[in-house]
Amino acid sequence: MFETVITRTAKLIAAWQAYGFVHAVMNTDNMSLLGLTFDYGPYAFLDGYEENLIPNHTDQAGRYGFAQQPGIGLWNLERLGIALSPLIDVEALSAALGAYEGELQREYARLMRARLGLPDSRDEDMTLVQQWRELLAAGKVDHTHAYRLLSHWDVTQAAPEALVVRLAGERGPHGNSAQARDEASAWLARYQTRVMAIGLSADDERQRRLAMLGVNPLYVPRTHLLLEVIARVEQGDDTTLEAFRERLGAPFHRPEEGSLEAAQALGQAQGVEAELVDDWTRPPAANAAPICMSCSS
């Protein structure tokens, strides 16, 4: 049982790290034996990429920040192991806990290869993933948009200027500088070389990007959008709630397109940014103050 809980917890937190989810209040009583969690008061999805996002205003020390989640998951499992120690040999418990990090890393690697559309598994892939994260962090690039834009790029062609500009980070400390664009272009060139190394046909490349669109959501429950919905519902307007629910229920394409194939066709016809005009993909304003919630939010 303990080994199963460890595996489920590792896979859950790997998904959080791959998709930019911050639980923000990972107390032991908010973790489940089923590999689920409770208490979603202060949670958030990343907007601009920030390794140590802390959306809980009571977490002044940053214990439950985004980058801390894998370690806290292990700490919580260790607490469970202590509770079970009267029933299970301590060495067996310790051995089971030793599998956590490897399980988490394998699942994270699997998810990131899927999100980046890497067609096979190679040892250097996690270096490319780390460089991708560093690129997003340097420019505070919108986490959800970045993957979506990448999903529309046909790597048999040169990288679109719109993609380079977005990955350079218009909101970052260096703005959309020439240096930032050069760094974005350099990563895209490495990525292009990696993807094309396997020798994909034109149809293989189309299917690769289609698969990326199927794992990289267009819509996530961004905190500022949820607050707007709540405010409108409190004023008696339920239409925005229904509109957002519709999108979150099918987050991989706009209702107007209705399918991944149609979403891909839109990107091919109008460019990688075409679908980001939807108001429900909107990031917070550049000058907006960070939103911190409480456990009772």
Image: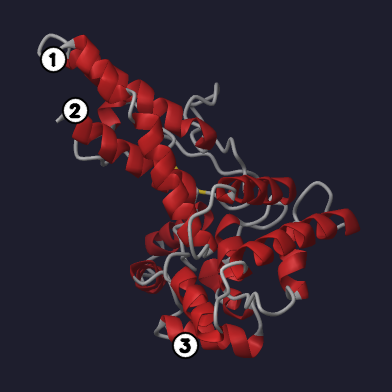
Q: Residue at x 12, y 9 (%)?
A: 86
* Residue 293 shows in the view: yes
Whichever of labels 3 and 2 marks the residue nearer the N terminus, that label is: 2
Near-viewer residue (270 or 127): 127
Question: What numbered label is drawn on residue 2?
Answer: 2
* Residue 297 shows in the view: no
Near-viewer residue (108 or 71): 108
Residue with the mark numbered 3:
262
- Amino acid of disc 2: Phe
Horizontal relation, residue 283 to residue 175: left or right: left
**For the view shown, which residue lies furthest in the left direction?**
87
Label 2 element class: helix
Question: What numbered label is drawn on residue 88?
Answer: 1
Q: Residue at x 44, y 62 (%)?
A: 229
Whichever of labels 3 and 1 marks the residue nearer the N terminus, that label is: 1
Vertical placement of residue 201 versus 103, above or below: below
Mark-to-mark CA distance, 1 and 2: 10 Å
